[in-house]
Amino acid sequence: MTKREKADRVARILDELYPTVPIPLDHEDPFTLLCAVLLSAQTTDKKVNEVTPALFQLAGTPAAMARAPVPKILATIKQLGLAPTKAKNLQAMAQRLVDEHGGEVPQDEEALEALPGVGHKTASVVRSQAFGIPAFPVDTHIHRLAARWGLSSGKNVVQTERDLKKLFPEESWNKLHLQVIYFGREYCPARGHDLATCKICGWAASKKRIKEEAAR
């Protein structure tokens, strides 16, 4: 089976399991989504969704976030990992939006990645989920599954993103990256997973890979 044939079969299975894929981070507009994605680093989506209502009540627009004192922002997100850094980045990011983008979240990838605290993955998520621009955000979970399934041998998420974009049609990227995330959470955890019985790993993973993970 070629990688393309394997990718097609993976996509069919994911479409059957997840015909619709809700965005896991609660938000109201591009700015609140940007804030939520920025906060999600090294933190679960569930935990982010627990703190963002208070955060957005304090500062739900770029102008309000830029005015908010960092200690107040920190107080609302203190239970998240890396909270002090995230609080500073939220205010600085909002101030940049006010100063350089008229208080609007830009759709341009380069402009997004230039914002404080915003990397390539965060920018890709916002472009995909807020603006419907085809993107394939690759986090550590997608990177892990792409390797398990033999779809990428990339040593980092950047190379994995390139590989997956070549295998899947552009019109599927926005939905597919969420489907893979949901599948990883529900069926394909990082540890204690029996690849041989998995709905996808069972046929997509190489015998060598199955043996290696079983021996861990």
Image: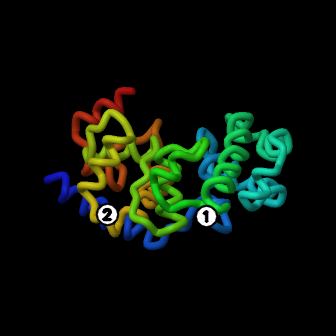
Kind of residue sitting beneath label 2: Ala
Q: Is residue 177 found left or right of 163 in the rendered image?
A: right
Residue at mark 2: 11
SS at circle 2: helix
- The quarter of the rendered structure image containing the C terminus is top left
User: What's under tag 1, amino acid-wise?
Assistant: Pro
Q: Which residue is mark 1?
A: 30
Residue 23 visible, this angle:
yes
- Image spot of residue 141 (x, y percent): 45, 44
Which residue is situated farthest in the left direction here?
Answer: 1
Q: Tag 2 or tag 1, which sits nearer the N-term?
A: 2
The residue lying toward the viewer, choosing from 25 and 183, is: 25
Identify the image's colour scheme: rainbow, by chain, secondary structure or one colour: rainbow
Left or right: 195 as drawn, with respect to 59 = left
- Please name the residue shown 84% across and 39% down the image: 71
Percent across and percent down for residue 121 are: 48, 48
Q: Residues within 10 Å of mark 2 (few under 14, many from 20)?
A: some
Q: Nearer the viewer, residue 59 or 80?
A: 59
